[in-house]
Amino acid sequence: MDNSTSHIVAFHGDGCGAEELTWGQRDVWDLMRRTGRTMNIGGTVPAAPGETVERIAALLRFLVSRHQALRTRLSQVDGGPPRQVVSDSGEITLEVLDTAQDPDLVAERLRVRYQTTPFDPFTQWPVRMAVVRSGGTLTHVVVMYYHVVVDGFAINAIVRDLAHLDQDTGLATAPAEGTQPLELARQQRTPAARRHSEQSLRYWRRQLHRIPPSPATPAVAADPGQPRFWEVVCASPATALAIRRVAARTRVASGPILLAAYAVATARLAGADTAVVQVIVSNRFRPGFAEAVGSLRQFGLCVIDVTGPFDEVVARAWIAAIGAYKHGYYDPVAHRDLVAGHDLSCYLNDRRTETRDEDRGPVPAEDDVRAALAGTTVRWGVREDTYDGSLYLHVEDDVHYSLWGDTHRYTADAIERCARDVEAVLVEAALGLVTAPR
């Protein structure tokens, strides 16, 4: 039987106070309220050889002390807008789970529990950390964050920041980088930030005018599934090779090429000539944001004509992506009013951060692409009662991606076909075949 104990970790950091939510924080807060999802983010990593509870506790103390986001709780008065409250000191718990079972399975169960259990943002700190110990040896570290205050790109910044932890003393070897959340909230009230938001919303308004009218009554699948949202998990070595061939020919980065393929796949599903895709914008390219630990991601809007040769679609997708990224930073309250009544239910989250567009060597031959098709796998994954949108593509790396689909709008066969079409469109383009909506 597993035995769980708590290791109390005291922390103290610079900066405290209360502010309104930042735009990124409010964006995720509204999304969670709308969908009912926990949206907790994190994962599991193997413990380093010889790792100890004391060193993991020191690591937790270092991170929470160093970053305001990890010392943030929320407050709300009489149903008004939530506010962020940053404390300069406190105590947080490191869970130590001793097990005589398979530690891999125990760590996975713990990860699932952490991910599916909602945070109470008003009373709990926004990070959960635990270690799994088997036979006296630490085997895994499990970490989960409250998404309102930490986005996926912030986790990457946290990992990079570990290089500034002195393992012997537990102290920092360099000041923290990046804009902290309290300062960001103040910045977003300045005239310059308000002008930027208004410019972004004008861009959104222009793109919304390009969207063809939607049916008065959205399509409903004849046999809706339960739970409602189904995930298709794909591994496609051919996709990775095909993207490299198209990139070499078009001289366009892999991101817009993937966006173009997804646009064609969703247009095929809808029987349309125009695809409407919301993309995740990290906003990390903005001054002071690259190493910021906080929630900065918002959505950008891409409206893409998918008619004609695929290379032309890629060019349009590249232009659409540039516009979406430039204008993906705005006041979410004003944005919510602007998009009300529009069907913007198709999403793309390209999670590749460290490996995209690295030099992969010579351009793959057509025969390499064809041969790689034998390695394609497609399977059904998780099913959930709540999700966001009718189609949501997550790209994990060059080979792996998953598509969530709303079975109340599309049949399971249609969702799977859309997932397969992402690969098919890219392979067709890599082999010089005709790609068009069908």
Image (cartoon, rainbow, N blue to C red):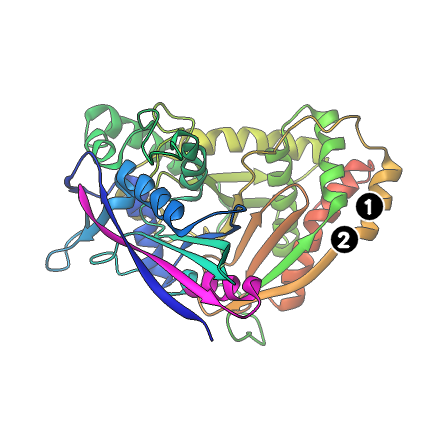
Image x and y of residue 396, in percent: 59, 46
Q: Is residue 346 above or below residue 284?
A: below
Q: Which residues are magenta?
A: 85-113
Residue 254 visible at all? yes
Image position of 423 (left or right of 344): right
Is mark 1 in CB contact (under 8 Å) with mark 2? Answer: yes
Q: Nearer the viewer, residue 385 or 381?
A: 381
Q: Nearer the viewer, residue 331 or 169?
A: 169
In the picture of the structure, the residue carrying the numbered disc 2 is 376
Residue type at mark 2 is Thr
Which quarter of the picture shows residue 88?
top left
Residue at left offset 39%, top offset 40%: 297
Residue at left offset 79%, top offset 28%: 363
Residue type at mark 1 is Ala
Q: Nearer the viewer, residue 127 or 239?
A: 127
In the picture of the structure, the residue carrying the numbered disc 1 is 372
